[in-house]
Amino acid sequence: MPRVVAKANGLGRSPTKYRPILDVVRGKRALDALQMLRFMPSPAAMEVAKLLRSAIANAENNYRMFTGSLKIVAISADEGTRLRRFKARSRGRVSPMIRRQAHLTIAVDEEA
């Protein structure tokens, strides 16, 4: 059985805001990770939970896996495209604003 992957590209937060959340749920059972994400105060945790629910649904519907035995085998937040903007500063100058985006990837598989 292949491991099931769900991806979200171009999310509006930087990867550094996702990585502490991903470190908490890495290697956990999928349903336990959902419970942990539910009580985290960060808004980024809701997006990670949404992607995890998508990975669970993919495993259940496409590969007929049992949701109670799913485990997170790989999870990562990678750098996406950067939007470069300029902000007006004093004395007629400008300074760059770089808006970072993230690509999230979650892979789940059945426990042995």
Image (cartoon, grey):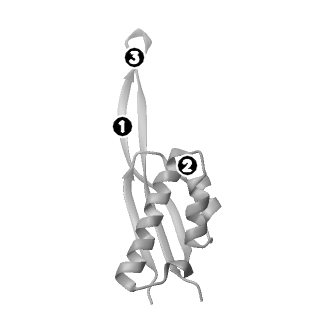
First in sequence: mark 2 or mark 1? 2
Of badges 2 and 3, nearer the viewer stands 2
- Compared to residue 93, the image places residue 19 above or below, namely below
Callout 2–callout 3 Cβ contact below 8 Å: no
- Compared to residue 64, the image places residue 23 above or below, namely above
Three-letter residue code for mark 1: Arg
Which residue is tagged 3? 93
Which residue is tagged 1? 84
**Where's residue 35, x and y in %?**
59, 61
Q: Secondary structure at mark 2?
A: helix
Which residue is tagged 2? 16
Of badges 3 and 1, nearer the viewer stands 1
- Compared to residue 65, the image places residue 86 above or below, namely above
Q: At x 55% / y 63%, what residue is drawn?
A: 34
Q: Secondary structure at mark 1?
A: strand
**Where's residue 81, x and y in %?**
37, 50
**Where's residue 83, x and y in %?**
35, 41
Three-letter residue code for mark 2: Thr
List the single residue furthest toward the top: 91
Of badges 2 and 1, nearer the viewer stands 2
First in sequence: mark 2 or mark 3? 2
CA gap, disc 2 and disc 1: 18 Å
Nearest the eye: 90 or 80: 80
Residue 27: image tag: none
- Compared to residue 51, the image places residue 69 above or below, namely below
